[in-house]
Amino acid sequence: MTVLVGYVPSPLGEAALRAAVEQARFRDEPVLVVNTSRGDAYVDPRFAQEAELDRVSRELTAAGVPHSVRQLVRGRDAAEEIVDIVEAEEISMVVIGVRHRTAVGKLIMGSAAQEILLRVPCPVLAVKAD
């Protein structure tokens, strides 16, 4: 089994990554770091550049955490990508960062976190940035 973390290059993503490492150590499982973009990668602030993902991989290696990093740019939103990975692979837990949104904001923009929470069959750990 594997702990999947939805990673974005922000304090929210760093908080999710720290929580995923804690869970992976507790469960004695590897971490799968997933970063996605719908295709507008150069203007999408949630899309991690190669240097950022290299840093994440170096930190996980230094911490002794087995891991893999997957970056997907397939025209789909992050929730769709994460749900598909969970359904196709042996994922024991999903870790995501969440931020406060108003009800109107969720109605207009949707909520990737909400979709993940409702659709994946495994536990989801939602964390906030420090």
Image (cartoon, rainbow, N blue to C red):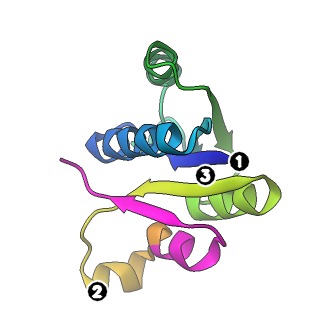
Residue pictured at 56% horizontal, 80% vertical: 118
Which is more foreground, mark 3 or mark 1? Answer: 1
Q: Amino acid at mark 3?
A: Arg
Quarter of image, res 127: bottom left
Residue farthest to the right, as pictured: 88
Along the line of sight, the residue nearer the viewer: 26 or 5: 26
Q: Is residue 104 above or below residue 7?
A: below
Which is more foreground, mark 3 or mark 2? Answer: 2
Residue pictured at 39% horizontal, 42% vertical: 45
Q: Amino acid at mark 1?
A: Met
**CA–CA distance in space, label 2 to label 1:** 35 Å
Q: Is residue 124 in the magenta section? A: yes
Q: Residues within 10 Å of mark 3 (few under 14, many from 20)?
A: some
Residue 119 image position (x, y, % from top left): 63, 76
* SS type, badge 3: loop
Q: Which residues are magenta?
A: 114-130
Q: Amino acid at mark 2?
A: Ala
Along the line of sight, the residue nearer the viewer: 107 or 62: 62
Residue 103 image position (x, y, % from top left): 28, 86
Along the line of sight, the residue nearer the viewer: 120 or 104: 120
Which is more foreground, mark 2 or mark 1? Answer: 1
**CA–CA distance in space, label 3 to label 2:** 24 Å
Q: Residues within 10 Å of mark 1 (few under 14, many from 20)?
A: some
Q: Earlier in the sequence, mark 3 or mark 2?
A: 3
Q: Earlier in the sequence, mark 3 or mark 1?
A: 1
Q: Is residue 40 above or below residue 127?
A: above
Residue pictured at 48% horizontal, 43% vertical: 26
Q: Is residue 74 in the magenta section? A: no
Q: Which residue is mark 3?
A: 38
